[in-house]
Amino acid sequence: MELGLWCMNVGTCADPEAAVRVARAAEAAGLESLWTGEHAVLPHPRPDGYPAPPDLPWLDSIAALTLLATATERVRIACGTMELPLHHPVRLAKALASVDVISGGRLIAGLGLGSLDVEFAAFGVDMAERGLRMDEGLDALLELWTADLPRYEGRTVSFSGIDAQPRPVQPGGPSVVLGGGGTPRSRRRIIERANGWYLFGTDLDATATALAEIAEEQERLDRPAALGPLEVTVTPPEPIGASTLQRYEELGVHRLVLLPRPDAPPQDRFAPVPEHQILDTIERAAALL
């Protein structure tokens, strides 16, 4: 079981100096990975129960990943998750490859569908197309990362007669971790296209149910051998101790990515947390390693 930390571009860690201090403390403590999240805009006024206020500081994920890459030496850096349908795949392939190069091959590419209708509206993207944009975006990323002569023809992205250098340090590109999984189409995409699956804010019971559902579907679908076993990452919605960590591990979870303040109520999950509390979370996590 590996342990990571989620919060590296949000709230307190939207301050670059605080993010560097937290990142270096996490690396020194032996955490395996540092995770950013992504929202370009937030709904205003704040919907009832929504965990992020509209004035929450939230750094761009690529900028934050670059900062983390230059501030650390060993810990993996990850986006968890970037909303692929809201990015042009050619631009995103370049950005993620650049971060992988700058980090020396430490990037995990966490990608998701996105869910905020106001965010899609702000980008002028139809939410009804997000599944198509997700599938074609994944195709385009892998083509640009791996093909000798990248070429792709789709409904939302097309290119030919181009190249994009440098390529990622990691052969075949960064490990692709997909969020979601709430529908058969999403689970099929995870099984057939992803190295890993990210379950954010998912407790033990919900994790057990999700893993049982995807295991049943894996028996019917042909997972490419090159992807290897599906690596499962979970962000628990509550504090964990040794017994909880063991139960996640027994379910088949490979990595827990901890919230900076896991005891916060859901509506305050993304609220800025004093830096000392984040460092306390890192210390408690280190004691479990």
Image (cartoon, helix red, strand yellow):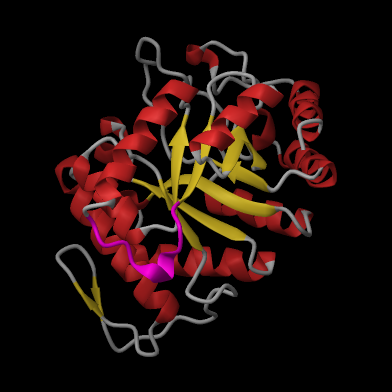
Image point 36% across, 10% down: which residue?
48
Number of marks present in the image shown: 0
Q: Which residues are magenta?
A: 221-230
Along the viewing direction, whichever of 181 and 145 lies nearer the viewer: 181
Is residue 124 among the parts visible in the rendering?
no
Camera-side residue of 202 and 105 = 202
Most common SS among magenta residues: loop
Residue 143 lies left or right of residue 259; in this view the side is left
Residue 196 vs 80, above or below: the answer is below
Residue 235 part of the magenta-drawn span: no
Look at the picture and state if 61 lies above or below 105. Answer: above
Residue 252 picture location, percent across and down = 50, 41
Residue 24 % position (x, y) = 81, 45
User: From the viewer's perspective, is residue 221 above or below residue 93?
Assistant: above
Residue 249, visible in the rendered structure:
yes
Question: Residue 39's image quarter?
Answer: top left
Viewer-proximal residue, 14 or 1?
Answer: 1
- Check the picture and name the quadrant holding the N terminus: top right
Could you say where residue 196 lies in the image, as x and y percent from the top left?
45, 52
Look at 20% across and 42% down and name the residue there: 184
Query: In the drawing, does residue 57 fall left or right of residue 278?
Result: left
Specify whether residue 222 is painted magenta.
yes
Residue depicted at 59% across the width and 63% down the height: 99
Indicate the position of residue 224 as horizontal and vertical percent values: 34, 67
Q: Looking at the image, is 62 positioned above or below residue 96? A: above
Answer left or right for 91 relative to 277.
left
Residue located 47% across and 75% down the image: 172
